[in-house]
Amino acid sequence: MLDHRCNSQFTLGIVSQKWLEWKFEEKVRQNPTIGYSELSKTIKDEFSINVTVSMCRRAITGILKKLDIGYETQFKRLRDYAQECLNSNPGSTVKIKTTRTVPTSPMVFERIYVCFHAMKMGFLAGCRKFIGLDGCFLKGKLKGEILTAVGKDGNNQMYPIAWAVVEIENNSSWRWFLELLKADLDITNSSEWTLMSDQQKGLSNVIQDLFSGVQHRNCARHVHANWSKRHRGKVLKTHFWQIAKTPNKAQLAENLKALEKIDVAARVDLDKYPMQSWCKAYFKEDVKCDMVDNNLNEAFNKTLLNARSKFIIPMLEDIRVATMKRVEKKKVWVENWRGNYGSLVLKKLNESILGSVGWEVIFNGVEGYEIKKGTLQFKVNLQLTSCSYRLWQLSGIPCRHGICDIFHKGHQPEDYIHECYSKGLYLKTYEHVIQPLNGEIFWPRIEGEELHAPVPKKMTGRPKKKRKLEETEKNKKKMSEEVSKLSRKGRIMTCQLCKGKGHNKRFCPTLSSQQGESAIRTPVAVRGRGTGRGRGRGRGSARLTDLSQESFVGTSACIE
């Protein structure tokens, strides 16, 4: 048997643009925003073949052109897909809204709303009456936005309720989305509910029209982003968040006075944003949710990052599959709970336990307590699970003042956590599951007028793939880059040989005195382009050059 001694080839002529399009069409279909360098690296890792980035760019461009042919057919089968969702998940809601330019023109897709029966029933069974609303842009050929409604489960994590693809985020699209959501959740008494949004224009009027008496919160992070455009600095930022997270009106007044002493203009401008919508002191207690930001929706939008670049049906399928997997994951995860509450709830309780150190407890003999530390004093009632600080009533988790009384009574803090966080309700939340769907060839054929795709909108400028950063986020990113790229200018070098300052080991005077002057005249290898007969060595070949003492001294003086 002969031993093969052939050299390994990492560049093959058979690897052409056509081969790349055939081999990676499905990969690009699943991730249309894949980078050229990323594909080149993937090929190198999987096949040990070097492919240029330009060839990958041509291949991806060719694949995307092929996929564009299927853009129109996606909408022709959209109603079939919607009917398959309804057949597999009875009780779900899938609504498609169409439009016509003129009465005789073809029917064109405009919006679609999806709310699965499992997510609706799970939310009503185990979640609090709190809904976060948000929208995010689509990044593919289909331009528009995804509107989302997200709840909060028993472990203070996001719970997707419904989502919709609309042409634009405005009063009309939000009204259409919220009307369907209100009907699905059978909301009759709006005063029991709390909605949170990101200060979208016009959304406040729509919410007040559809949900009379509802508490509408605005994300404090977006309020701060607008307010801080004129009032910057860490001191003002600290005061803002202290005000936003103050749970009672007495301390809120003190914090506002402290802000006014620092900056009167900042205090006046803060009144432009009604505190009833973003300050804890004005939140209702029966919802058991003290959130001041809309991070739950931001977390859900992050899971849609890749889906937002795909066509309409693959995008809806990615959202459905991700939600279905999440429900299954939570059903398995809850079985690993050591107690009756989730990890995030216990973490918040432990923070209260640590904060309870150093408070003086005064007991009246029945259920009343006074908790004192310095000039602060609060009244606590264990029977009513209430504290004048109000954080216990807002969150449903004992605050540090309540923990003092619970320990004084000899009870366990877990016994005073609100039942909305219990394992029983958490299991009810994820009891219902989304049923799987058949493949495209098994979808029912819906008779009727053919549905056409909307005309793709060509946006000005280069397509943006990354989210627009706020000013505070830009400053954080800039600071991290500055820390990672610290300049060496101004540093005093230290010699590794003699540990002296002002020189390195190459110009160490101790080494020069030991080796003598001959060390200075030692030929030095200078790298450069070969000339004359040395050109055959190629670019970057080394050649030896004798440096005179004068030129060396001048160089050393320049370096020093």
Image (cartoon, rainbow, N blue to C red):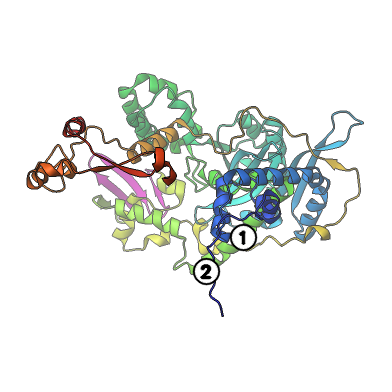
Above or below for 215 versus 426: above
Q: Residue furthest front?
A: 533
Residue beneath disc 1: 325
For label 1, the SS is helix
**Residue name at image x 70 percent, y 30 percent:** 458
Q: Is residue 373 magenta?
A: yes
Q: Are marks 1 and 2 in contact (CB under 8 Å)?
A: no
Q: Nearer the N terminus, badge 1 or badge 2?
A: 2
- Indicate the amino acid at tag 1: Lys
Q: Is residue 348 left or right of residue 407?
A: right
Q: Which mark is residue 5?
A: 2
**Residue name at image x 49 percent, y 47 percent:** 289
In this view, the residue in front, 414 or 184, is 184
Main SS, magenta region, reads strand
Q: Which mark is residue 96?
A: none
Residue 531 visible somewhere in the drawing? no
Quadrant where the image shows the N terminus: bottom right
Q: Is residue 133 left or right of residue 245?
A: right
Q: Is residue 88 left or right of residue 250?
A: right
Magenta residues? 368-389
Above or below for 87 versus 521: below
Task: Give residue 111's position: percent from left, percent from top.
Answer: 75, 39
- Indicate the amino acid at tag 2: Arg
In this view, the residue in front, 245 or 396, is 245
